[in-house]
Image: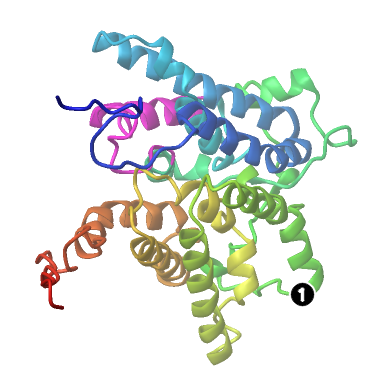
């Protein structure tokens, strides 16, 4: 009589198991973004809050509409947090006082074209938030490059709740006196790079003009390191990306300091820190192997430096991420893990010689 296994553990090939799930991962990433976002809302006030709410609401509405069209249940998809996170990251990449329709169009584009066209969560090739940001930048360059100097909440120049609504919905024009240039503007205008300790300190803290995702590199860094500590994101992509960007900037700055920006400006200004920890690490559009992730991160760092230095836009994060997203299948094909029992070439490993009774 054949004996039956006494264990309730299913038979079959071994698999990697994890107690985490998609909603928990999405909530953890949003939680890590909260400190920097709260500081950004403090700096830019009610218009920035309005934009954040509109961006998230637009993503949720687009997700529900797409699911209704294909007759799929919306409750689980809307509750997994992926649409909320997309709207969250998109809002962090927009000018904080942008008009309402920028957030609405961006959120709808990110979910519809960047996600649901490919089949939904886990099927998209390109990062939805970055795809929407590039589409908005190309289509509406004026609105996407109009930056505001920080107007801290409760300060004399900060807009109130009603004034914030008027700014967001276009019934009140924004005064030219609060307009400002970002720290990366000299890359395009040929101006002097603000690389003194005070300017770099302002970039690290975040008291500069830019999007909410460009404020407080320090808080974004702390949130990203917490995600790595919790093993929610891989460490290879942020390390390779920031190290490559910093090394390239260092070499070129040493060769010609007046022409090329210093490395700390490249690392602290713009969306480099946000991208390294919260955008480039998206598991859907990044390689699956550790060595592939190093190549992926290094490629993003190289492209950011090239676009910032010689391209037509001062900030190249979104373009760099999308280009490397497109290269991910090739990286996964070229850098494959060795299968158990086989060489890296795919050939089977030789079997050990059988031992005889006399051996």
Q: Using residue 336 as the reference point, say whether residue 40 is left or right of it.
A: right
Spot occupied by residue 212 in the image (x, y as percentages of width and height): 64, 43
Tag count? 1
* Side (left or right) of 306 relative to 153: left
The answer to whether residue 154 is above or below residue 146 is above
Q: Residue at x 50, y 58 (%)?
A: 315
Farthest front residue?
Answer: 358
Residue depicted at 59% across the width and 35% down the height: 28
Q: Residue at x 26, y 61 (%)?
A: 337
Left or right, residue 156 beside residue 47: right
230 relative to 48, above or below: below
Residue named by callout 1: 196
The coloring applied to the image is: rainbow
Quarter where residue 43 is shown: top right
The question of residue 109 being in magenta is answered with yes
Quadrant in the picture for the C terminus: bottom left
Question: How far across and how far down the image is residue 252, in percent?
Answer: 51, 84
What residue do we see at 14% from left, 68% from top? 349
Q: In the image, residue 1 lies at what x, y percent?
A: 14, 24
Taking depth in this image into account, of 308 and 245 the one nearest to the observer is 245
On whether residue 117 falls in the magenta region, the answer is yes
């Amino acid at each position: 009589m054949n004996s039956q296994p006494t264990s309730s553990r299913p038979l079959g090939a071994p698999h990697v198991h994890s107690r985490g799930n998609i909603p928990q991962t999405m909530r953890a990433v949003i939680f890590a973004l909260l400190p920097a976002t709260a500081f950004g809302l403090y700096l830019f006030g009610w218009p920035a809050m309005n934009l954040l709410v509109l961006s998230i609401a637009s993503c949720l509405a687009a997700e529900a509409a797409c699911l209704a069209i294909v007759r799929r249940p919306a409750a689980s998809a809307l509750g997994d947090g992926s649409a909320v996170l997309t709207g969250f990251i998109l809002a962090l990449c927009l000018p904080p006082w942008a008009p309402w329709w920028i957030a609405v169009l961006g959120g709808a584009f990110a979910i519809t074209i960047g996600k649901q066209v490919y089949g939904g969560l886990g099927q998209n090739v390109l990062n939805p938030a970055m795809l929407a940001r590039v589409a908005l930048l190309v289509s509406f360059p004026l609105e996407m490059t109009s930056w505001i100097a920080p107007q801290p909440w409760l300060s004399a120049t900060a807009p109130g709740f009603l004034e914030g609504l008027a700014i967001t919905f276009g019934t009140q024009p924004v005064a030219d006196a609060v307009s400002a240039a970002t720290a990366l503007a000299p890359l395009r205008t040929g101006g002097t790079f603000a690389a003194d300790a005070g300017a770099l300190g302002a970039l690290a803290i975040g008291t500069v003009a830019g999007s909410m995702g460009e404020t407080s590199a320090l808080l974004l860094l702390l949130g990203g390191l917490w995600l790595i500590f919790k093993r929610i994101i891989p460490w290879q992509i942020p390390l390779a990306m920031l190290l490559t960007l910093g090394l390239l900037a260092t070499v070129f700055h040493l060769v010609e300091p007046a022409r090329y920006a210093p490395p700390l400006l490249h690392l602290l200004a713009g969306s480099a820190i946000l991208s390294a920890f919260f955008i480039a690490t998206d598991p859907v559009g990044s390689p699956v192997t550790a060595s592939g992730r190093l190549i992926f991160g290094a490629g993003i760092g190289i492209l950011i430096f090239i676009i910032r230095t010689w391209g037509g836009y001062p900030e190249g994060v979104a373009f760099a991420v999308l280009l490397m997203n497109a290269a991910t299948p090739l990286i996964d094909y070229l850098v494959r893990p060795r299968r158990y029992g086989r060489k890296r070439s795919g050939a089977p490993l030789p079997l050990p010689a059988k031992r005889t009774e006399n051996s």
